[in-house]
Amino acid sequence: MAELIEVRPFSFENLKEFLFENVRSKVQAEQKNHVAYLNDYLTKISAKTILAEREYVDRDFLEDFSAYYVRCFNEPRRLCVRLHFFSVEVVQADIDAFLKALAPDKVKLLQGNYLGFLVVKPLPFTLVGRTCLHTYDDANGRRFFPVCREYEVNLLGVPLKINSLAYQEQDHVVAACATSALWSVFQKTGKKFQHAIPSPVEITKSASLTVPLESRTFPNKGLNTQQIAQAIRTVGLEPYVTACKSNEELVATAYAYLKGAFPVLYGFLQADNLVVKGGHAVAVTGYSLGISKPVSSKQPKLNGFCLKAFRIDKIYVHDDQIGPNARMVLDPAFANFDMGGGKFEQKESLTSSVYSGAIRAIDHILFFPLYHKIRIPFSFIQDLISPLDRLLELIRTTMNTSWAERLEWDIYLTTANDLKQEIMKSTILAEKDRRDILLARLPRYIWRASATSAGKNAFEFIFDATGIEQDSLLVHLIVEDKTGVELLVRALNSMPLAPYFSASEIWPLIEWLKANNPIPVTSTP
Amino acid sequence: MATNKDGSMQLLTKEEGIKWMESLAGKTALEQALEDAIKVTRELQDERMGELRKLDRTFNL
């Protein structure tokens, strides 16, 4: 019988041996994308040692086991193997040392070099269970994984911690791709919004309870949009669902929520060699701001509107067909996709980094599980900002302001607490202004829309994310460069503004700015 | 914005800019910019509503 604890140096061969302990066919298992992907991923995060913890009880697999597998004639085992990874060489003697006696240096060795774990499910083929691995490094401030959370791990009495978002592959029985993606997303929302985190089988059951599938629930063959929304409602959150017609709309919307650590489920049509095969769903874990200069919108109607999110060149996703934090690269080129039924459409796409560009994602849908009081969506805030931006650009290109370049907007959802924490640490604001904002009564959830020009902060609007669309949502204004805002308010005051404007969504914001002149701003000295 | 003798454009000073904003030409230009921006925002909102028809989909790959 294999040892309960076994330590080996990290290598592709050793990884495969541990992963394939229970598979039906090693030849078949070797064909899985996950195996090569995990080897590549673990190599990139500098894994040096694998420690296998056998006879491990995994709560999520146990739920799936008790709900389905236990009644199979050839039921699999219920115990799993948990593989731990370390970025330093650990040998069996190190483990034996602290099993025999107090060995603080060995404990420190494990704690200081922990890269996370992977649960190997005892199933014939779909073996990658709950997996929490260290993310890629930040690549000099380019990569961000804001929806990670801390997981506490206990290995033989040694408390370990890993900052990650749990991943697992679909087992094609109790969970298809959408269930696995939801499960990952709920790992974050469960902590952020305080709800119980359901197992895959519980998610699939809840999704199809009030919106039944045409065919049987288990083995599960996927969830539709309504079922995903229903699964989100079941954990006590509200689903905000939106379709994005372009890559830039996708990244702008996803970034607006991700930056403040609100996770997102991303559904799309998957095409293989430009032929659409069907819908696929993944959990977005991060993004790469890989473009160093501001990028203007490609949408001509937006007249050069510039969002920080447009600098994104890649997103990172938990793709249950591939592995954790898999790259999806934005491809700006349009391609002709076979949509089925003899219909072809020209579209932008995202390519998966794993299949040499053959697999592409088009027709994006984003699902945000949100606390019910977050009522104002990103699109509403963007629609307030873009007309103001047009006005500000006219002012900038006509008059002498201190804005050397077009304003770049950073729009994202966050909390008043996070804003105040940032202000508390800030050394830029004057004492009075700092005090004003730290003492300001703000709603729990806010939208921040900050404008910068040539890398210099100009000003920032703070909007109520919990308010009413017809009301003025602006609750605070932070000004670091007074000239531009002063000119904006003067411009609004000088315009007679025909009745046409009073019917627009931006009218309450215009009225607020006009009525509050001089604006009770927070400004830098 | 003023035009120099060599044809290059020169930005107005803050005081000149304020005068321009309060002139008929300035008011018209600013109001037109805002009106155009609101119109395209509404068009984009309509396009966004059209995209919502794509929501009816099953995710099963």
Image (cartoon, rainbow, N blue to C red):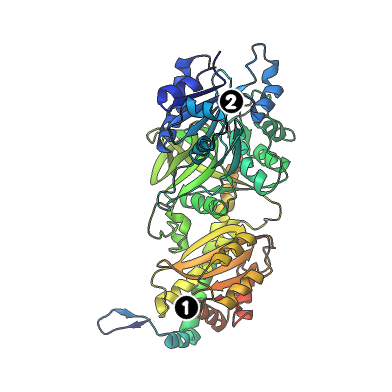
Which residue position is annotated with label 2? A171
- Residue A37 at x, y percent in the picture: 44, 31
Which residue position is annotated with label 1? B29
Residue A403: which quarter of the image?
bottom left
User: From the image, which quarter does the N terminus of chain A lie in?
Assistant: top right
Q: Is residue A340 visible?
A: no
The chain identifier of the residue carrying mark 2 reads: A
Residue A316, placed above or below residue A73: below
Q: What element does badge 1 sit on?
A: helix
Q: What element does badge 2 sit on?
A: loop
User: Which amino acid, by three-letter code, is at mark 1?
Assistant: Ala
- Near mark 2 (Cα within 10 A), the count class, few <14, some 14-19 or many ≥20, is many
The chain identifier of the residue carrying mark 1 reads: B
Q: Residue furthest left?
A: B6
Residue at 41% x, 78% y is A398
Would residue A230 appear left or right of A52 to someone viewing this image? right
- Residue A446 at x, y percent in the picture: 63, 61
Residue A464: which quarter of the image?
bottom right
Residue situated in front as seen by the camera: A383 or A458: A458
Which mark is drawn over residue A510?
none
Q: CA distance from mark 2 to mark 1?
A: 61 Å
